[in-house]
Amino acid sequence: MNNTLSGPDLTRGITLSTIADGAMLLGHAHGEPALLVRRGDKLFAIGAVCTHYGAPLADGLLVDDTVRCPWHHACFSVRTGEALRPPALDPVSCWHVEQRDGTAYVGAKLESVGPPSLPAQAGIPESVVIVGGGAAGNAAAEMLRRLGYSGRITMLSSDSSLPCDRPNLSKGYLSGAASAQSNPLRSADFYREHRIEVRLDARVATIDTASRRVQLVDGTRHPYDALLLATGAEPVQLKVPGANLPHVHYLRTLADSRALVAKAQVSKRAVVIGASFIGLEVAASLRARKIAVDVVAPDTVPMLKILGAEVGTFIRALHERHGVMFHLGTAAASIDERSVTLQNGEHLPADLVVVGIGVRPAIALAEQAGFAIDRGVAVDEHLETSIPGIFAAGDIARWPDRLTGERIRVEHWVVAERQGQTAARNILGRQERFDAVPFFWTEQYDFGLAYVGHAERWDNAEIDGQLDAAKQDCTITYRRSGKKLAVAVVHRDLKGLHAEVEFERAT
């Protein structure tokens, strides 16, 4: 996180005429980077650094009484500093602002306000069980406490580790740019202090919706008044001879990532099977460790269905400039201790193999318990399943999308966190519609792309700007039958934020 101070010292005063209505002024206050924000005749001062990955909020977008992060679209209140939307979970600082004689002075820091006292009322559950310890489950547990919920919260996670920053696993942590300490979302102390009981290695065997009870494989039973299913997705397994050898890895959990990093440290040649986002991020991270990489995929162009031929061709060339070899239009036929044999007869030497051929929603529990299934767990606009009092969020949830008018399911980290928060509010009876615009990002070498919206099917991809080796600066708009469904931006962060607001306000 970059806390370098720049701009004026806001504690010394800023003439009101120097900051226009609807503008943000970057400065510092009491040794911290700060933003002075003007809304009409009111001024607010908040921290200038996003609490997620340290992005400069001054480069973001002011929308109503919020500031949105330019990198990953977190959102903060200018009145309180509260983190209103993930991926940021922590607030920014907030200071008192005083106006005297046409000048604004930033004063003392405002004390953070604790969670409200949730009044006792009918419909508030006495206990909440969350099945899943990923992005959605963690966000839901935290939001319940932020809203003042005082009942019992139990998170049942099949992972062996506390909730972690999963996007970091294929990017910074695997490449060696981020430390192991950056992976956990929260410490064990955090969960204890917030009275969130986290059960690790807790594999759920059955959900008894009639008696409102979850039973683990070990026989332990957990009664609930409200239940959130957030079981996430599972990697699609490669089914070829040798796929179970010790040097063949998948990347989903923190344990997966640790094992992959350990193997990468002693490997010289890797084969990545799959040219998905996860596969290509892994390829870039392994190249950062000076490992020779071959990518194998049946596609003729990487990411063709999602990003289009022109963007996919650029991404292939980007990797090739960094030494990656592509083997497209084919697939792995078998794996042995020293190589991967392809269906076209090629033999690729490998002491490390990483499989990234997609994921499937983990819906076996929901199917067994009798939930309505629609290529995922079907939920309504409030994320409630077909069984009252039970909600679903994250990779398994298929919900009615306001923009497309279709039911969609999205496997994105930020979407999962936002759904977890919405589910928490609705568990407490808020009846809040989930209508957040989907967002994800990828980083590969010096290339970064942010994607706003959801275009599962599109018939036109229009590129505005340049996307080649010389310059990466463009906006890609995806349309179906003339309707704009999604926008991807490369080095145009502000354009991405404007696209998000446009989709939010579309009728």
Image (spheres, helix red, strand yellow):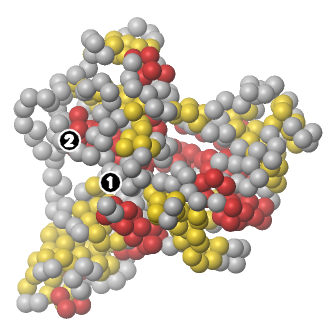
Q: Residue sitting at 35 percent across and 51 percent down?
A: 402
What amino acid is at disc 2?
Gln
Numbered disc 1: secondary structure = strand
How far apart are the alpha carbons under marks 1 and 2? 18 Å
Q: Residue sitting at 18 percent across and 27 percent down?
A: 125
Q: Nearer the viewer, residue 251 or 211?
A: 211
Q: Where, by quadrant of the figure, is residue 490 drawn?
A: bottom right
Tag shown at residue 487: none
Numbered disc 2: secondary structure = loop
Please give the residue where the numbered disc 2 appears in the rendered image.
431
Q: Residue sitting at 46 percent across and 63 percent down?
A: 483
What amino acid is at disc 1?
Arg
Residue 203 shown left or right of residue 11 in the figure = right
Residue 377 shown left or right of residue 259 in the figure = left
Q: Position of residue 428 (x, y in %)?
A: 19, 36
In this rendering, the label closer to the viewer, 1 or 2: 2
Residue 172 visible? The answer is no
Position above or below: 102 against 59: below
Q: Residue sitting at 22 percent across and 22 percent down?
A: 225
Please give the residue where the numbered disc 1 appears in the rendered image.
85
